[in-house]
Image (cartoon, rainbow, N blue to C red):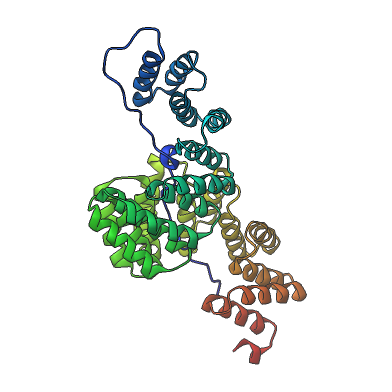
Amino acid sequence: MLKIKIAVCVLFVFLSFSDYGKSQININNGKQVGDSTDYYMNQGGIYFNKGDFVNAAQYFTKALTFNEKNTQVLLFRGWAYIYLKEYEKAIRDANKIYQVDSVAIPDLYKILGVAKMYMGKPREAIANYNTFIKLKPSFGEGYQLRAQAYNELKDYNKAIDDYTIAIKFSVLNAEKAEMYYRRGNAYIEILKLNEAYADYLKATQFDPQSANAFRGLAIVNKMNKSFEAALHEINQAIQLKAERINYSTKISILFDMGDIDACLEGCNLYLQIDNSNAQIYILRARCVLYNNSEYIEGLADLDKALALDLGNYEPYYLKGSIYRYQEKYNLAVDAFTKAISLNKKDAYSYAGRGLSYLKLNDTVSAQSNILNAVKLDSLNPDIIEQRGEFYLEMGKYEQAS
């Protein structure tokens, strides 16, 4: 029997652009002189708060013509550059503040950290956040920002520690809910599902309108195979916010429940609205595999998924599985090999390649791959069954049991 892996599809909302550090400028509504630092700074602040960061930066630059070392204006322009994704300019402004006073304006380190995060340098960002926290130890945002940097480094335990401190310093219920939600995400990454569920539940208590938290609850129940509860919670998330990520999570839950018709219908409806989600194409191909039919359509969906996400190993794994169904074993080996090149820890791809090699009478390569699969996932009943299939084909009946 051909065993197809069921994906644990954990879907999270990625950070929006402003999540690494939000900033707004207080405006002086008093009368301003038409050609002065205060006038240009105030006009820049008005544009900044409207989201017009191009004009904001221009006005801040004019304000600096009166005093190029004005740290407050440099700070404001630095944030404008962050929003404009001109990170080197933001860093230059922060460094100018540092040259004037390295202690009085801690936010310069936040600008440096945020810029480094967007430049893909989380370790350097952490160094800046460390200084920011040292100067403002009772300010929760520093811990939150550092936690995000630790997440990027996959150092989830340190991220959890920082989110715990951020929760302590959060004042508003919505802030506490967001920190519990993010800590829950970190717990999921290290498979502490009970802790993740407790945090998501806390998040819903502090903010009953948090669709993200309800989706988190659904994901934990999905991973625990409590599919009815997962479906109930994702429906709550959809009622609160009809986001595509909530619908795609629901589709994956329906698949895991074995409701293939509903899953297929959901995929078709989703792709009518958004045909740029690789995971939905993958799920629709899985539905095809589940029904052991329409292989051409399944392969077409997997090609579309790869066009959207070339670095994803899953479509290659599934293509290999389809080729095995079709008894095209050379193509299956090639597909599984590509999957393994992208994810060397996927036991299913090794097992699939091993059984494909067996059909090609390459018993040495077949055994090597089967043993690799067992080594990677020795307690997985699917892998054990495929090992048994290998030994049965080899006529080694005692080892097959």
Instruction: Estimate the x, y position of residue 33 in percent, counting from the top left.
Output: 34, 9
**Residue at 39% from the left image edge and 41% from the top image edge:** 272
Instruction: Estimate the x, y position of residue 23 in percent, counting from the top left.
Output: 38, 34
Query: Residue at the top extreme?
Result: 34
Q: Is residue 46 visible?
A: yes
Instruction: Residue 35: name its quadrant.
Output: top left
Instruction: Estimate the x, y position of residue 168 in percent, counting from the top left.
Output: 33, 56
Q: Does 185 appear above or below 20?
A: below
Q: Does 400 appear above or below 99?
A: below
Which image quarter is the N terminus in? bottom right
In the rendered structure, the answer to whether residue 355 lies left or right of residue 3 reads right
**Residue at 35% from the left image edge and 31% from the top image edge:** 24
**Residue at 47% from the left image edge and 57% from the top image edge:** 159
Which image quarter is the C terminus in? bottom right
Q: Is residue 297 visible?
A: no
Residue situated in front as seen by the camera: 326 or 76? 76
Q: Does 185 appear above or below 55?
A: below
Instruction: Estimate the x, y position of residue 148 in percent, counting from the top left.
Output: 47, 50
Instruction: Residue 72: name its quadrant.
Output: top left
Total tally of numbered discs in the picture: 0
Instruction: Residue 331: name its quadrant.
Output: bottom right
Q: Does 44 appear above or below 236?
A: above
